[in-house]
């Protein structure tokens, strides 16, 4: 096994959230060793992150198989961390790695939080993946991870290009100009989601504006096998029709 030596500032939140995981789950980055004295984390080396799989227009060129593995594996990973009371807070293509056999792995627990029982104020993360509840209630929680993964999947499925918004998340509640930038992005997303292929209804349920109505990781894992199976059949039919 190759080892990536990832040296950086180890915040207490970061080390706690990874260290608090009881056992290894294949879709969560494996912490091999840590040393608080030298601020060193040794992580399993997985492979390239999803943002590397783009063409000149920043559109994903992940294969159907890779897309489905990402959807299934990361849904299981999120279900696992949520069951352990961990919110990731920064799910995005750059923080999902593809390893051998297309195993998808969630990494970068640098701003994650352990033990949150209700939505909390948290202004970390990446602008284009922040859920609408942050704009309207300045709070986010477990459903925010599902939203961020939904936006990530829009990229993975080639529906949007790799998002590049650069506004300051902390300024959204206090600066009307920044807030309207974020609202414009959410409007764009709403239109994109509405016009996404009907067969992607499960993906749409990850991007419901109301966090209380948004699908949970548990429900997602439950519903995914049937969806992916019908997706595969859909692709097979397409391939047969074209050939
Ligand atoms: N275990 C790993 N195996 C392979 N690549 C990794 C691994 N961990 C991180 N990387 C690569 O390094 C990048 C940055 O790592 P990470 O996301 O953990 O830190 P970060 O805080 O986002 O750092 P930065 O802000 O410098 O991007 C990832 O996007 C990924 O490309
Ligand atoms: Mg990162």
Image (cartoon, rainbow, N blue to C red):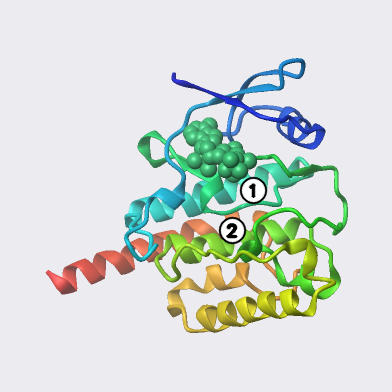
Query: Can the viewer see residue 162?
Result: yes
Q: Where's residue 68, x and y in %?
A: 42, 54
Residue name at image x 70 percent, y 42 percent: 81
- In the image: residue 120, left or right of residue 32: right
- The answer to whether residue 27 is seen in the rendering is no
Which residue: 50% across, 51% down?
A: 72
Foreground mark, 1 or 2, reads 2
> Looking at the image, do the residues carrying marks 1 and 2 touch, with CB atoms under 8 Å apart?
yes
Residue 106 lies in what quarter of the image? top right
Q: Is residue 101 above or below residue 7?
A: below
Nearest the viewer among 134 and 202 is 134
Task: Please state if 144 lies on the left or on the right of 25 as rendered.
Answer: right
Distance between mark 1 and mark 2 Cα atoms: 9 Å
Q: Could you tell me which secondary element the residue under label 1 belongs to?
A: helix
Numbered-mark total: 2
Q: Which is more N-terminal, label 2 or label 1?
A: 1
Tell me where residue 166 appears, x and y as whole percent.
62, 64
Q: Residue placed at 81% from the left, 55% from the top?
A: 122
Secondary structure category for the residue under label 2:
helix
Measured along the vertical axis of the image, is residue 16 above or below residue 59?
above
Q: Quadrant of the N terminus?
A: top left
The answer to whether 3 appears left or right of 165 in the picture is left
Label 1 C-beta lies within 8 Å of the nearest ligand 2 atom: no
In the picture, measured across the screen, residue 208 lies left or right of residue 101, that is right
| Circle 1 crowding by C-alpha within 10 Å: few under 14, some 14–19, many from 20 | many
Q: Quadrant of ligand 1?
A: top right
- Mark 2 Cα-neighbour bin, 10 Å: few <14, some 14–19, many ≥20: many
* Quadrant of image for the C terminus: bottom left
Q: Which mark is residue 149?
A: 2
Q: Position of residue 137 (x, y in %)?
A: 85, 71
Locate residue 207, reporting x and y percent.
62, 71
Q: Pointer 1: what residue?
A: 78
């Amino acid at each position: 096994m190759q080892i990536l030596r990832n040296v950086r500032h180890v915040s207490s939140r970061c080390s706690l959230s990874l260290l608090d995981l009881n056992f290894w789950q294949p879709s969560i980055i494996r912490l091999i060793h840590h040393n608080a004295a030298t601020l060193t984390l040794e992580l399993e080396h997985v492979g390239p992150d999803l943002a590397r799989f783009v063409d000149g227009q920043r559109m994903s060129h992940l294969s159907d198989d890779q897309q489905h593995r990402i959807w299934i594996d990361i849904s299981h990973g999120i279900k696992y961390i949520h069951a352990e009371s961990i919110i990731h807070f920064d799910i995005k293509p750059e923080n999902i790695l593809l390893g051998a056999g297309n195993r998808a792995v969630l990494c970068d627990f640098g701003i994650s939080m352990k033990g949150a029982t209700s939505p909390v104020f948290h202004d970390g993360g990446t602008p284009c993946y922040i859920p609408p509840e942050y704009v309207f209630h300045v709070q986010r929680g477990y459903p925010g991870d599902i939203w961020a993964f939904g936006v990530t999947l829009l990229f993975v499925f080639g529906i949007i290009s790799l998002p590049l918004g650069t506004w300051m998340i902390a300024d959204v509640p206090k600066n009307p100009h920044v807030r309207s930038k974020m609202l414009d992005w959410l409007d764009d997303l709403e239109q994109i989601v509405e016009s996404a292929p009907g067969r992607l209804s499960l993906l749409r349920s990850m991007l419901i504006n109301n966090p209380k109505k948004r699908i949970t990781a548990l429900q997602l894992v439950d519903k995914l096998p049937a969806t992916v199976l019908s997706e595969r059949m859909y692709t097979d039919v397409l391939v047969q029709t074209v050939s």
